[in-house]
Structures are given as structure tokens and as C-alpha cells.
Image (spheres, grey):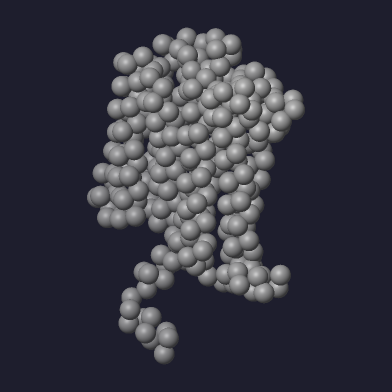
Amino acid sequence: MNRLYQWLPASTADRRVRVLAWASLVSQTLIVGTGGAVRLTGSGLGCPTWPRCTEDSFVATPEMGIHGIVEFGNRLLTFVLVIIAILAFLSVLRMRRERPELLRLTVALGLGIPLQAVIGGITVLTQLNPWIVGLHFVVSAVLVALAVVFVHRVYRGRTTGELLVQRPVRALALATAAGAWITVLVGIVVTGSGPHAGDGGAARNGLDSELLQHVHSWPAYITFGLSVLLLVVALRLGLAPLRRAVIALIAVEVVQIAVGLAQARLGLPELLVGIHMVLACVLIAVVTLVLLTLRGSERAAVEAVPEPELATTSG
């Protein structure tokens, strides 16, 4: 056991930590896609109880058909997330004094998994209550954001706390992020009023779906406008990291808007709705990256030191 502990990274986030950080982000996004598949295939009650799949079995039975397989498959992916979370925690354990923020992030991501499992169980036990289903998605979006912070900290080091942009630019970036989150939250409410309940007998939230679709578009377009304005500011001020992050944000927004318009006009086809759900998490991921570029980091501070100064210091 001691040999294994000594094998773990001691002070530097090496390739093992980087791989696990990306695995955390990818898996947290992937489970949103599989959760969407559960709802869009009407498999929300494929396993009608929790934590067992049936009263007598933890796994899906042949009698449950495809819906049982889909729902059980989504539950099974939770164990993959658990394995990744444990490995990520172990990978930074020896760095807990030098990099305590990495340990805190892995703990937060790890605790989010049982929280999601409990919410998922409540979802089943309440017969797919749309508000509980919506909460399930909100927690997923938060975990995706945390995973982005984890990846960023692994690559860029701890934040120095130094604000790299003027306060008006920071305010604009925060407004853009707030717009993105509001868009996603309103979208969750829209989904709770629409036809894809996860099961034919599941309740809806009773709100006007057609009206909510229009309401959902308002913060989306406002966020897009703020993103374009933020890009103009980043270009004028020569803020390369912010510029790259905002370009990625605008690209995601353009695709998301196109998918949203297409699904509204085509009667909410399942595939487009699923893509829209996954892109919502990608949107949260990228807007989180935008905010992370506003403050300095240890790696950026080292890179900013001129080479002659580095040479003099080392001498």
C-alpha cells in the first residue's frame, strides 16, 4: 500500500492527473446525454423502483424490455463516474498541501455523484416529477462547471486572485455567464412542460409550453449579444485567453440556437432535443472557462516572465 501511495503524483499534476481531469469532465457531460436518452425513449420508469431495478432485482430483467435496459444502463454509468472520482481523488492526494484546491474539487465532484443518485431515486419514486427531473439536470450542470474548474486548475495552476481585466469587462463577462445560466434554467422549465416526460403517464408542470419556448429564447439571444460584445472588447484590449474562450462560447451558442430553432419548427424530435440538452452542458462548460480566464494563475504568471529574467533568477 505504501508503494502505491509513493507512486502517486507528489507535487506536479502530471499526465495521470490531466487524463482523470478530462475524464471527469467528459463523464459528467456524457451522463447528461444518457439521462436524456432515458427520458426521450420513454424509459424513465424502465426500472420502476430504486435503488433496485425491480422489487427483486438490482439489474434489469428480460421482461422489462428495452426501457429497462436503457434506464439500467444510465444507472450503471454512475459506477463509472464513481471510479473516475475515486481515481481523481487519489491522484491529487499526495499534493493536498501544495495543491489543496485540486483535492477540494475532487471531493466536491465525488460527493456530487451520490447526491445525483439520491435525486435520481426521488425522481423514480415520485413518478418522474418534472421539478425533481429539472433539479437533476441543474446539479449535472453544476458538476460540469466544477469539472471545468478542475481541468483548468490542473493545467494552469492555482489562481493568483489577480484580476486580469478591468472591472467593466469583468461585469460584462459575469452578465454573459448569468445570461447563459438563466437560459439553461428556463430551458429546464420548458422541458418540464413539453411532451418528453420520460414515461407516458408522467405528469407535466402544467405551464404553457409554447409560451415558454418564446420566453426561453429571450435570455438566449441576450446572452448571444453580450457574448459578441465581450468578443469585441477582448479583441480591442488584446486579451488572447479571453478572446479564445469567447470565440468557443459564441460557436456553441450559434449551434445551440440553430438546434433550438430546428427542434421548435420540427415538433421537438427526440434526437434534436437530446443534442440540445448536451449542448446546454457544453454551454455551461465554456462560459465557466470564460470566467476562469478573467483571473491570473500560477502557470500564466510564470509564462509572463521574460526569458532573460528567468535566466538571471536561475543563475
> Residue 149 at x, y = what percent?
50, 51
The total number of labels drawn is 0
> Is residue 297 at least partly visible in the picture?
no
Residue at 59 percent across and 14 percent down: it is 202
Q: Is residue 234 above or below residue 159?
A: above
Give the quadrant of residue 239: bottom left
Which residue is at the front of the view, 256 or 160? 256
Q: Is residue 281 above or below residue 123?
A: below
Residue at 47 percent across and 15 percent down: it is 194
Q: Is residue 294 left or right of residue 238?
A: right
> Residue 271 at x, y = what percent?
39, 26
- Is the C terminus in the top left, top right, bottom left or bottom right quadrant? bottom left
Residue at 56 percent across and 16 percent down: it is 199
> Residue 81 at x, y = what percent?
58, 46
Residue at 67 percent across and 19 percent down: it is 126
- Is the N terminus in the top left, top right, bottom left or bottom right quadrant? bottom right
Q: Is residue 33 left or right of residue 10?
A: left
Which residue is at the front of the view, 154 or 25? 25
Q: Residue furthest bottom?
A: 315
Q: Is residue 258 above or below residue 295?
A: above
Q: Residue furthest right?
A: 56
> Residue 218 at x, y = what percent?
37, 22
Q: Residue furthest front?
A: 62
Give the quadrant of residue 311: bottom left
> Is residue 264 at least partly visible in the picture?
yes
